[in-house]
Each structure stands twice: as C-alpha cells, then as structure tokens.
Amino acid sequence: MSTITIAAPTGSSEAVKAPPLRPQNKQLAILAILVLVAIPLPLILPAAQGAVAVRILIFLLMAVGWNIMSGFGGMFSFGHAAYFGLGAYTSAYLLVKHNVSPWIGMLAGMAVAAAVAVVIGYFSFRYKLQGAYFALATFAFAEMLRLIVTSSTFANKSVGFSVPLIQDSSLWLIQFPADSPAYFWVALVLAGAAVAISIVFLHSRAGRYVTAIRDDELAAASLGAPVLRHKLMTVALSAAITAVAGAFYTQYYLFVNPDLGFGSAISIQAIVPVVIGGIGTVWGPVVGAIIIGSLTDVTATLLRTPPEFLGFLQGRSGLDVVLYAVLVILIVRLLPKGIVGTLAARWRR
Amino acid sequence: MSARMLVAGLGALALLATGCGGSAPMGAGGAAAGRDEGPVKIGALHPVSGSNAVDGLQMRRGAQLAVDAINAAGGIKSLGGRKVELVTGDTQGKADIGQSEAQRLISAGAVSLVGTYQSAVSTNVAVVAERNRVPFVMDVTASDAIFSHGYKYSFRVQPGSKAIATAAAQYLKAVSEQAGKPVRKVAFLHEQSDFGSGAADAFTAAAKQLGIGVGPNISYDATTVSDLTAQVTQVKAAGADVLAVAGYYRDSLLAAKAIASVKPDLSAVWGVSNGAYDQPKFVSDAAAAGNLYFSTNYHYDATNPATVALREKYQQQYGDPMRTGAVLSYDAVQVIAHGVEQAASTDPEKVRDAIAGARVSPLTVGRGQIRFAPNGDNRNAFPVLMQVRDGRVQQVYPPEKAESRPDYRVAWRP
Amino acid sequence: MTELDTGAPVVPETAPPDRKARADKGFLSRAGIVAAVLVVAVVLALVQSGSGLVVWQSVVTGILTGGLYGLIAMGLTLIFGVLDIVNFAHGAFLAVAMFLSFGMVQATGLHPYLTLVVAVPALFLLGAAVHRGLLSGAGGRSLENQLLITLGLSLLLENGLLMFFGAEPKTIALPGDFQFPLLGAVVAGSRLYAFLGAIVLGGLLYWLLRRTRLGTAIRAVAANAPGASLVGINVRRMHTLTFAIGTACAGAAAVLAGPLVTVTPTLGEQFNITAFVVVVLGGMGNVVGALVGGLLIGLVEQLTTIYLGGQSSLLGVFVVFVLVLFLRPQGLFGRRA
C-alpha cells in the first residue's frame, strides 16, 4: 500500500490551492471546520435529537479509539468493551466512592485502560496471536473483566454505579441540566481532540512505523523498526481514547453497570462505525459514527410513524432491527472498503 | 460496478441526510410545548422489541386500556374533560435507548412517564425524569437501588424485590406450620445478577429473623446455563426440605426439569419473585413437573371483579390472556391520571406533588389503596402466594386474597 | 487494506511416516496431560464439595452438556477451518433450525427427531445461499467485513424470527422422554440422545472428510486453495459446499438440542461464545477435536461451579480458553501447519 493519506470526502481540492499544505495540516484544518460547523447544532436540534447527537459523539470517540489499533495498527480487536468499561468504572468509582472530579477520573481511567491494554497486548504479541485468534483473545479478556466486575463487591456487583445528581450545573463535575447543550460541547471537544490526535499520530514518525509494521511486519523489523514497542504504544493510545468514551458515557447517562460497560455489544459498537465508514482512514470513523449513531433512531422513527404504504408494518416488534441489519449488510457488501475508503479509492484513480 | 457503487454512495448519503433530519417532526420545540392544549399526554416506555417484547407489548396495551377507560369516563374532569393520550416509546430493552426515548417523550409534552419493565432501563429513565422534573411511575421494576438515591420524581407501584423476598419467607413459615410440617432448612437457587442475588439476600435476612436456616445458596449464570441437574443434586445432598428459586423464565423452567429428574426430598418448591412459576405458560410448558409449585410475587388480583372484567376485555381486544405486568401498567396510568385530576394542571411538577399524595385503588393485589412513601415506593404494595393447582395458577395465601387453600407438598412425594 | 492473516488452516492432513509417528506421540502425550489435569481437577472438586454424589453428577452433566457443545461446534469448526470465516451467525442458524423443527412438530405432530429430514436440507440450502449471496467475493474477504456481515445476518435472522413467531418462549416436548439413574446420578434420555447424536455426526463428518472424494477436495482447498484450483478443483464451489455442510450441521444440532432448551429467537447467543471456545480448543477444522473440546468445556463449566460458587461458569471457560490461545493456538489436538 503506497499511501494511507486519505482525502476528505467533501470537495476540498479547490478550497486550498497554494501554498500546498502538508496532509496532516489539511486534515486538521478540515477537522477545525467540521467542529466549528457542529458547535451551533445543539441550539438548533430539538432535545431528543440533541440526545442522538451526543450518542453519535460517544460512538465517534469509541470508533476513533478502535480505528487506531485495528485500522492503523492492523490488530483486530473484538474486545474494546474492556477499555470502555475500565474508563467508565474507574471514573464512576472515584466519583461515587471518593468524590473525585470525573475529569480526573477520566485521566485515571485512561491510565488504567492503557495499562491493561499493554498487559493484554504484551501477552498476545509475545505468543504471536494474529487475526481471528487475536480478536477472540481480546474478546475473552473483555468478557473476563465483565464477569469479574459482576462478582466484585467494590464495583457494586451487577448493580453498577449511579452518579449522584447535583442541584445546579458544574463543568468540574460534568453535570448540566438534562437538555443543556453543554453536554454536546464537552463531547465535541473530546471527540475533536481524539480525531486530531489520530491525525497527528498517523503522520508522526511513530504512526509511520505502525502502518509499516501493519503492512509488512517482517520488512519493517528488518529495517530496524522497534516492532513490539510501537505495537504496545498503539494499543495503549487506542485504549486510552476508548476509556474517555466510557468515562463520558457514565457522566452523560449517569449510570453504568457491567453489561453497559463491558458487554460484548459495546465491542461491536466500536467496530461497526469504522467498518461502515472505512477502516484505517481518518474520516471513516467520523462518517460511520454519524450514520450508525443515527440509524437506530431513523429506523425506529420510520416505523413509529411509517409512510402510508408501509402502514401495515407499524407495531411489528423486531422490524426496526431487521431494517438496521439489512442496511449494515448492504453497506458492507456494496462498499467493502467502507464509505470513505471506497470514495478515496475512486478519487485517486 | 461503478453504477452500483454510485447507487450505494447515494444511498449512504441519503441515510446521512435523514440521520441529521431524523425524527424532527416528532420532537417539539421547547420542553413544555403542547402541554397546555390538546389531549394530556402520558409517555409509556416499554421494550416492545428484543427479547422482552412480549411483556413490553402487553404492558403498552395495559396502559392503553387505562387511557381508554379514563377517556370513556369523560377524560380529566378538573381540566374541563380534556382527553388523555398515550405517547409511546420503545426502549428495545437497552438503557441508552430508554434514555433518549424518555427525553423524546418529555419533549413531546408528556406530563408523566410510565415504564419500563427492566431495572437497568428504569434506573436510566429515573435520572432523566429527575433532571427534567417530570414524574416517572414505574409499573414493573424489581430493583430497590433506585429508591435509595433520594429521587423526588420516581414512584413505583409493584412491591420491590426486598418486599417480595421478605413476604416469601413469612408465608413459608406460616404455610408450613399450618400444614404441620414446619420448615427446617431452605436451599436457595438463584440467578446471579442483581435480581436473583438481591432476592436471595433479602430472603436469607428475613428467614434468619424467623428462625429458618438457609443453605446452601447456589447461583448460576442465567444467560448461558443449559442444565441445572448438578445444582439440584447439591440441594439433594444438603438435605434441605424446601428449595427456593429466584430466576427468569428460561432458567426457572430448566430448574423445574432438573428437580423433576433428581427428585430431591423436599416438602415444597418455593418461587421468590420467580419469572416462571406464576405464569400460565409455565403450567403448560412444565406440565406435570410444575404441579404444586409455589410462587411469591406481585400478581393481578384474581379475587377483584374489576380485575376480572379488565382481563376479559383485554382477552377480547388482543386475543391473549392479560399478564400481571400489563395490569400494573394499567394501575400506574390510573395513578398518573389521578394526579393530573387532583393537580388540575398539566404542569409536571404539580402533577408530581399530586401523585405523591395520591390514593388509588389498584387492580393488582395490594394491602389497600396505592399510597407512596416519601422515597416513592408504594406503601401498600403487597405480594401474594400462588400455587400451580389443577392446571392453573391460583392465589392461595394470605387467606383474604386466596382462591383456594395452599397444599404444602411436592408432586413426586406422597 | 490490511490482510489479516490467520495463519494456514490446520485441517488434519496425512504426514510422512516418521513425522506422523512423532506427531502421534505428541498427540498421545498431550492427551495424557489433559487427562491427568482433569483427574486432578475432579479430585480437588471432590475435596472442595465434600459430596461424592454432587461431583459425580457434575461430571455426568458436564460430559452430556459437553456433547451438546461439541455437536453445535462441529459445523462452526468446519467453516472456520476451511473458509477461514469467523461465523457469528452460527447461533442464529441454530435458532432458525429450531423454529423450523418447532413449527413442524406443532403443525404435523411429528416426532421432533424426524424433523431432521427437513431441517438439515433446509439449512444446507440456507447456508449455500448465504455464502453465495453474502460472503463470497471481495466484500466477504476481510475479517472485519465477515464479522459485520455475519453479525448483521444474525441480527436479521433473530429479529425475523421474532417478527414471525413472537418472543414468547416455546418448548419442544420429546414424546416418551425418560431418565435413568447411573450410579446415583440421573441421566435424561433427551440429553443422552443429543450426546449420541454428536458422536454419530462427528463420525459422519470424519468419514466424509477422510474417505470421500469430496472430503479430499475440501481438505485440498483448505490446505492450499491456489494449488487446488490448479489441479481442477472449483474452489468457490467447494467453499459454498463446505459452508452449506457447516450450516446443515447446525440444523442437525438444533433438532437434537431442541427438546433440551427453551426455543427463543435469541437462543443462539447462549451457545455462540461457547462454540467458538470449543472450536479453538479442538483445533479449527478438526471435527473430532470439536467433540473432545466440547466435552472439556462441559466439564470445566461444571467444575467452575463447584470451585467458585457465585461465579459464572463462563469465567472458568474463558480462563481455559485464553491459556489455550496463548500456549497452543492451533488447539489441543490440532497440528502446527
């Protein structure tokens, strides 16, 4: 693979003509524009859509985290729930039991998740697990964490943690009135930062090593790339970003239990947007999260108030999920490299 | 190939566009929009898709029947006969979906919410209700943890997990003594999440006070278990004379099959908040294996003529027997309508205050009218003891709610 | 795009005599180690629980349940080994077949086991259609696409069943089911039948793979697809055929397991995880290994319940799984390619 630089899906070629920007600066500029455009969204959207927008940003954080490890690094993880859950539980535990600000809890969660990821990664690489075997191993670790938390008294067993409500809003405690746009803005800053980090990482020296190792580990190693160290670094960064998603999730939904934190559905949620959007691309997670984050809401809405000719479908339970599944399968079949990946491939031709 | 790609790309873009536009027509502008005119809206949140869809749909219909009854009786009289309308949401059994659906219903102008069947979802919705200052009346929600946070806007109609488990221990002592075979030692078999473990802990505490020994305490993972024979053998080896079971439908049925094959020397099988042993479906699925099983749980009041009439109506309208969950939803909606009536307002905070002081006669078994304690739990919620007899589930204890007398024995021993 | 290489498939193959002898010796010593560990584990369980009856019943239950796991995993291991596809829809196929069996028993009053005659061919066709329509070609090549397609498919099938049959749990009653005591432990007839069914199915697949031209072709495709196509084997057809045989196995497993479980659209989820563990344990593509792996997992589950009361039996399963992944990723009874 000659290059992993991906042009933005929007027609940005005429936006900047001269002097030519370096690819990461161009991508960062596009990101800045996207973030600026998104800022007024919560003021325009009705409250229920505001909740969907925040959900999209949480999906985005998870997707960016997963993409760094599995897209850039080529290590297919099927257990990102482990890092999401560690982020969620660490911050919830510190807040509920020790009254520590969720910002600090978030940092602690990132550290814990990164450390656990390095341990899991070390053993997996040490024993040369690859592809499906690596995926199954990560899955097993996430499930073990779920089972351990479910039976641990200090983590409140299967009850989980409820974040105590406060009367007024506080940025320090990341708690605002229910339909406050502040939630969206906090999530936007976190997600924007995560995308920016993924851009910078991809174009950094370390990032180039990582993609080189992904494309041909043997060749990269023989050219002197420190393989293990870079793999572990990738894994740690990916886990830390996913932990941010978990910590923010707990603050937004104010509740976490073992299934919501460590359930296998979470691992799947991290994967689907990236594969739909385009694995290994910078913008794939963004596009994928927007589509997948709103898809459940769209299908549910369509079926709640169906157009006339679909009226007979109303109230059939299970149909919205069927529709969701069909759309996901169709996108994967028709655009095997994801939306961004396929568009970019056409662009380059 | 390229044409197909183009179509796919366009499709994806269209999706994206609808995604952003989403369900915009549903959500109204401000939070209070539409409350002052048109029908009074009550938001019902239930899992009508996913693995709990049957119960979710039952409960949504129960709520709808209550709304129909209120409208047929002339709507909300203190508001000049304004009609009531049920706005519905599907939680899909997922906490985060429940949260956004709750937000949507509140934005659509619901004066109060009712739901949600699952404890994890209710926990999330309770937070939404609290922060939007909209009352949330739970029909089915076993977990007691929600009521320990000092929430002002959360109410519950059904008896909580602890209330049921405590009553189960008391009934067991009374019924076994009545039969002349006082209970000695209870083995407890339960699924290991909050639901089953909570029931086991509360039962053990209550039993200890009554001087009943509990042990062994055996748990299993309800999501994966496929055979409980070894666990029931453990009960047999321990020499317990009563086996208490707290589980969901599937695993409780497995337990019944295992009990039928191991045949431990028991005097009774005692369901505690059990998801199967008071279901008509269990009676036919387990057939002979389920005969004479006891179950302590919330239940529709089979001795109340109004309940019987409601269940007949449900059967006519939907072609299914009405379950207890649906009757609880009916009660919960009655509580909300009563609150709106008393408050003579659609302001959710005033409705909340009226609900807190409400007195409503339930169609489920209760000690009296529904009355809420300061933490929002129903003071008069009251579990009843049932038994599988002559191919159906009958209320057998306490005497004032009994259809027949308890028969304290198991089917495989004389 | 990254090609996620999973290493060469490890379908058992004939090796030169000297290597074969050495491999057999390694196999025997591994089997010995596993047996020894098991014996120690059972003795420890005996000490822990203090009741011989409970441990004996646990062992019996573990073996019977293990047979069921092996039965379910057989189709999966075939697909995994030959096509390199991690098929997350296997549980959903199981559910489809079970509803098929349930529907026929309801409609015609047939003996449940007789529904094999319809369920197996129906699942064979379903599998062929799924492979041709969804998994072959460029879209189904990478691990992530396979994952999403099979996951999407399982959502689709499960919720399709939910729409048509409703979420109400169903039961399939086995006429004339019986149970008998075995040295104090009880054995249910329906579980024994499923266990025997697992052995018969394992034998059939073994015979198919080792003794028929078709099996030889399948193994050739698994070992070296480009080479196989050079000698005139239609690789794509072999892949479709193998996938279809794998899902047909799910059909057979579903019919035999039907009377043991409560039939719901999501019942496959309950077995999916365990089935993957069994596949890796037995060595992917190794049908007999799947049966042995199933027995081991059945025992591990039961022993975990004795060792760690209050813990999910899955915890023990995952610990064993991770150890095997690290120490012998080709499976306890697979051979390094």
Image (spheres, coloured by chain):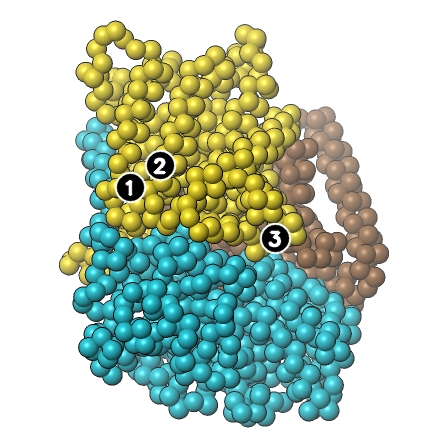
Residue at 57%, 92% in the rendered image: B399
Q: Chain of mark 2?
A: A
Looking at the image, is mark 3 or mark 1 nearer the viewer?
1
Q: Quadrant of the C terminus of chain A?
A: top left
Q: Which mark is residue A42?
A: 1
Check the image and name the residue furthest to the left: A308
Q: Amino acid at mark 3?
A: Asn
Residue that numbered label 2 is attached to:
A185
Residue C11, can we see it?
no
Counting residues from the start of the chain, the first of labels 1 and 2 encountered is 1
Whether residues under marks 2 and 3 lie with C-beta atoms below 8 angstroms apart, the answer is no
Residues tagged by mark 3 and mark 1 found on one chain of the structure: yes
Chain with brown colouring: C
Residue C138's image quarter?
A: top left
- Secondary structure of residue under mark 3: loop
Q: Secondary structure at mark 2?
A: helix
Q: Colour in which chain B is shown?
A: cyan
Looking at marks 2 and 3 on the same chain, the residue that comes earlier in the sequence is marked by: 3
Report the Cα–Cα distance between label 3 and label 1.
Answer: 35 Å
Q: Which residue is mark 3?
A: A156
Q: Identify which residue is drawn at 34% across, 45% down.
A: A180
- Say if residue A55 shows up in the picture: yes
